[in-house]
Amino acid sequence: MKYLGKLHYCLGVNIAQDDGNTFIEQSVYPKALLEKFGFENCKPVSTPVEANCTIERQLMTLSCLIMKNMSAVGSLLYLSTKTRPDRNFDVRNVAKYCSEPTTKHCSCIGYSDSDLAGDRNDRKSTSGYRFSLGSGLISWRTSKQSCVALSTAEAEYVALADAAEEAV
């Protein structure tokens, strides 16, 4: 063994030692996980799991999601045991279904966007949306809006209404 000085980094955990106190933090690893599983542009929420959330087994499993699901849950288990014990219960609840993920375990994600008066001739905006399930694109559309929007917010609301109609 060789003494290399105070420990600063070990297994994805940053360690700071000062006046007899030790502080640990793990910001690089969660960011890498978000990028690995395609969630780097998602907005943070204080409670990522619904209160009193129950997940039931279903007969139809999605075998194509098993490996990706197991990898994601394993990564989150590692994170929750190191520096996020507050998320341990949530992750362990999801881990029970690693080998049999169903449509309830993966969510459909949708995006909508628009421009304001993109067509310079009639001043109508263009709307677009896309929906994906897992890593697969399942629905998309781009079209000119039927009305003339008076603001960016109005153009976005029209695009969002189109996307909501498709989601339903």
Image (tube, grey):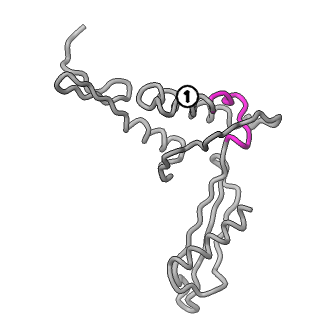
Disc 1 marks a residue whose amino acid type is Gly
In which quadrant of the rendered image does the C terminus lie?
Answer: bottom right
Outermost residue to the right? 59
Outermost residue to the bottom? 121
The residue at 48%/33% (across/down) is 86
The residue at 21%/10% (across/down) is 2
Q: Is residue 88 left or right of residue 145?
A: left
The residue at 34%/33% (across/down) is 25
Q: Is residue 109 magenta?
A: no
Q: Is residue 134 above or below residue 83?
A: below
In which quadrant of the rendered image does the N terminus lie?
Answer: top left
Front residue (pair 13, 24): 24
Q: Is residue 153 above or below residue 168?
A: below
Q: Which residues are magenta?
A: 94-105
Outermost residue to the front? 52
Q: Is residue 96 magenta?
A: yes
x then y, percent, for residue 140 = 67, 63
Q: Is residue 81 left or right of residue 109?
A: left
**Mark 1: few/some/many CA within 10 Å (<14, 14-19, 20+):** some
Question: How many numbered badges does the structure rendering display?
Answer: 1
When asked about the image quadrant of residue 61, the answer is: top right
x then y, percent, for residue 10 = 33, 24
Q: Is residue 143 above or below residue 18?
A: below
x then y, percent, for residue 116 = 52, 80
Q: Which residue is mark 1?
A: 74
Q: Is residue 4 left or right of residue 9?
A: left
The residue at 68%/66% (across/down) is 164
x then y, percent, for residue 93 = 62, 31
Q: Secondary structure at mark 1?
A: helix
When asked about the image quadrant of residue 29, the answer is: top left
